[in-house]
Image: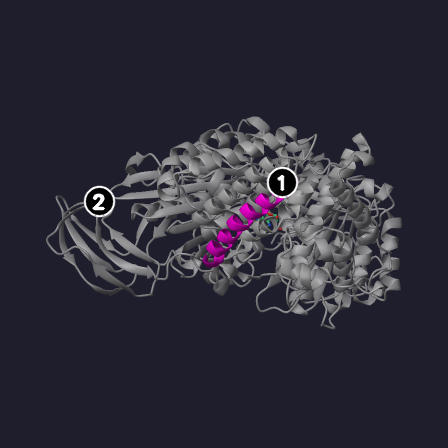
Amino acid sequence: MAVVARISGPVVVATGLEGAQMYDVVRLGEMGLVGEIIRLEGDKGTIQVYEDTTGVRPGEKIVNTKRPLSIQLGPGLLTSIYDGIQRPLNILREESGDFIGRGKIIPALDQNKKWDFIPTSKKGDEVQQGQFIGEVQETPLIKHKIMVPHSVKGQLESITEGKFNINEIVATVTTQSSKVEIGLSSWWTVRTPRPVLRKLPPESPLLTGQRVLDTFFPVAKGGTAAIPGPFGSGKTVTQQQLAKWADSEVIVYVGCGERGNEMTEVLTTFPELEDPKSKRPLMERTMLVANTSNMPVAAREASIYTGITMGEYYRDMGYGVALMADSTSRWAEALREISGRLEEMPGEEGYPAYLGRRLAEFYERGGKAIVISPEERVGSLTLVGAVSPPGGDFSEPVSQNTLRVTRVFWALDASLASRRHFPSINWLTSYSLYADDMGEWYSKEVSPDWISLRKEALEILQRESELEEIVQLVGYARSLREDYLQQSAYDDVDTYTSIKKQFNMLSVILEFGKLEADAIKKGIRSSQIGGLESRKLISKMKWTPENQIDKLLHEIRTSMRQEFEGLLIKVSQ
Amino acid sequence: MSTISFKTLSKIAGPLIFVEGVDNAAYGEMVEIKLEDGQRREGQVLDTRKGLAVVQVFGPTLGLGTTGTSTRFLGHTATLAVSDEMLGRVFDGLGNPRDNGPKIVSKQKFDLVGSGINPYSREQPSEFIQTGMSNIDGMNTLVRGQKLPIFSGAGLPHNMLASQIARQAKVRGTSESFSVVFAAIGITSEEANFFVKQFEESGALGRTVLFLNLSSDPSMERILTPRLALTTAEFLAYERDMHVLVILTDMTNYCEALREIAAAREEVPGRRGYPGYMYTDLASIYERAGRIKGRKGSVTQIPILTMPADDITHPIPDLTGYITEGQIVLSRDLQRADIHPPADVLTSLSRLMNQGIGKGRTREDHRSLADQLYSTYAQGKDARALAAIVGEEALSELDRKFLRIANNFERKFVNQGFDEDRSIEETLNIGWELLAELSDADMKRIKPELIEKYGRKKISPKEVE
Ligand SMILES: Nc1ncnc2c1ncn2[C@@H]1O[C@H](COP(=O)(O)OP(=O)(O)O)[C@@H](O)[C@H]1O
Ligand SMILES: [Mg+2]
């Protein structure tokens, strides 16, 4: 019989584990705490426990479920909030009150709710893995596709339209060797990536409505981005802005080892905010995984895998999915803590030697891909990970290993944050390796002038930084920083800017800048320019709603041309 | 539950004792330790296996010997008996009476550690607390249920700031006052007396619970002291519907105690010798602030910590800042410039500010006025640095304006008397007054309508001193 031999925090040593396999999930002790076997030597093993082990005694029994950590995938995932091992936190509250209860096994999906299943295949059809056989309207925004399970190929023997709960059978497939029943839900082990047929190069940007990101450092749909920064520099707000405004069909938001109130904020604001395109509540496309800093450490490590598996599942349906993980550093620290208790040989700063590999494996699960299905279906999974470097020093192992495998770097800057320049993304050190590849998309979809405008703006900012110590450059660069780069997440209008408005704002600012530079060359003082009406109007652009912006732009363009002409005439007189 | 005592201490290492022959001590079980001379200590199981329990002793290990000491495993984890009688009382760092009052007897026992609040149960904190201090109310607003630490340095007046907050804090439009739970963690008796005297003078002592572990008290008690305070606070908030302000000072001493245990356990040290799990450990304290759906009371936390060598990147302030909802940072430069409180509003932050301010809470211009003040003050400080090199005369006209505003911001806005309790309107009006000399185009953070409405109006001299 398997029993507890030793308890030290989240790590338990067990004996009598005959027949156990690595990563088997076990139930531990009288409370039935959930744990996972992470080391095996003979019949002795080490278990990381996903719940607080206080009160557990040596000698308590252990039950092996003989199954690796798996989650249930099916309709009902959207709008849910889970802990790191996919327990719905709302139901957990009903069962154990306001404080997290222990040893509770709660199904991730509502077991009784009936969904309207509409078949898209019919009896007798030849079907194979990944193929859609029907769908369920999961939320008004998302049709949940029911797919033939992996490695199943055969003939549809039956398929039934009607109302079903997630455990009922809606179809059966006769394969060469057996009969396979298909329900509305399926299971997947979180540590195994869901396979795809082939990865594709990303070609379009994930539009976020955040000017500094979309214009200067875009992440591609299916791309990877890292957002490191010290505390208070804007990691969480930026991630939440992405979760709100990114033009992704499905969002997975993983709060990993961070604040409880930040999850509450998402839970209270998302149902009230509407998606700019569909006008539906944002929550209808969102899944939340919350393993906050006061929840057990080992589950923090699992939360990232739970989140990404749910993301992959919707990608497999052909959706564009974006996952935000805040913060991957807490995940890495959980690895370190467990590794330390296992007395593994520590690598850099106490992190296990496999930290880099684990991070790479995680980001490798992102991408744009042809998913497994007979019909060349394309889905994408964009990954954005926040990193919390100790002391804000990016040279530490988690930042460095992350930057090696991600292609966009949004460098948060404490000095910008302290002067309340938000988003405090440093425009000189950040980069996007997708920017060049996306050029074609922007030229086609936004304007043929896009590439040159962007380049010009970046050059001005660069030049400003070189001169910064000596004089503040004329209005040009300052206007770019204040009227364009600064964007408040808390202003109803400024919080989101469409790509078209971004282009127009940028082109107006640059035109003004050129007129200004020219005027100064001809002897006009900058104080004269500061007072121009068009100057004032430019700072109103960010606060002007999308449906009124054209009028304002026209007004600015006309008045700035007239005003500069007026100034020049005065000088020449 | 094993009630037999064990006299089988095999080893004592720092604050840890190794008890042999114990087969099934529970992880986290409380232990009573009896010394040869009859003295008692409390302890808690940190690591347990068949035949051995490692126990952390809350108290000095002086006088403990491998022979003659007996240990009794109590069969329960750490709890605190809680009752209304605790208000107005003074306890030591382990929760025993430190005044001459009786021990608290109560059927209600709360777990000292307990599980975390389910994020789904939380209610978003959003009620503005007026502290009467402009640097906080105006620039880094505190709300009910927030955890907002003070990052200080040795010798800076964090105690004055914290006690002024405790004295003046109110939610306007309500008559409820805060009860205060105060935990002294390794501070001097002089500092502790300062607080006691403050509470006494403001008449708050009757609704205050004090836990005092002073610098001369055993350092290991410090592991429990903040948890006793928070358990008490949760009782008052969630069982008695009170709004509780918890002051924990000094968290740096708490972290030192944590490091001491880690060293005794020969753990692989993390940054600067602090254990790798310090983030998680601190979170188990700070995350106990908040509001819970459907419950009337709240727990607001003001932890105080002194940054070793004034270094904000030191693991203690660093990990704290990663967990708390902002920080109020005290600056030695401002202290030298005789600004009181010497709060640096630029490195300070309140992450919950937005939820607590604006129309219907403070005033509609609050957000943008604060943004403008940050940015103008930052520019003024840049100008000050530049002036130090090139001289003030060489500054541009605009930079000189910024510099003037920055100076006045420190002297008139941040600086205020220890007894000066400003209303939020007074605070905001001082802010507008400072910006008066800027043109509209230099106030990019503020919408023109708001400048029109609040900025250009004549402010009566009475409102600004
Ligand atoms: N885009 C933004 N607009 C306005 N304020 C912001 C923005 N980004 C960050 N902030 C401010 O900075 C604070 C800290 O941001 P946050 O994202 O919580 O930092 P981090 O996660 O890096 O610690 C927020 O509470 C908010 O006041
Ligand atoms: Mg954050």
- Coordinates of residue B247 in the picture (x, y in percent): 75, 55
Q: Nearer the viewer, mark 1 or mark 2?
A: 1
**Helix, strand or loop for the magenta stretch, by majority:** helix
Say what secondary structure mark 1 lies in.
Answer: helix
Question: In the picture, residue A462 is in which quadrant?
Answer: top right
Magenta stretch: includes residue A124: no
Q: Nearer the viewer, residue A350 or B296?
A: B296
Q: Is residue B359 left or right of residue A437?
A: right
Task: Answer whether residue B115 is visible to the viewer in this image.
Answer: yes
Q: Residue at x 74, y 43 (%)?
A: B398
Mark 2 belongs to which subunit?
Answer: A
Identify which residue, A529 or B413, lies in the foreground. Answer: A529
> What residue type is disc 2 on?
Gln
Q: Residues within 10 Å of mark 2 (few under 14, many from 20)?
A: some
Q: From mark 1 to mark 2, how far is it between C-alphas? A: 60 Å
Q: Are marks 1 and 2 in contact (CB under 8 Å)?
A: no
Residue beneath the point at 86% across and 43% down: B337
**Residue A57 drawn at (x, y percent):** 55, 48
Q: Quadrant of the N terminus of chain B?
A: bottom right
**Mark 1 Cα within 10 Å, few/some/many (few <14, many 20+)?**
many
Q: Secondary structure at mark 2?
A: loop
Residue B454, horizontal then vertical, whole percent: 71, 62
Q: Quadrant of residue B182?
A: bottom right
Per the rendered image, the range of residues in magenta is A547-573
- Please name the residue that numbered disc 1 is placed on: A475
Chain of the residue on which disc 1 is drawn: A
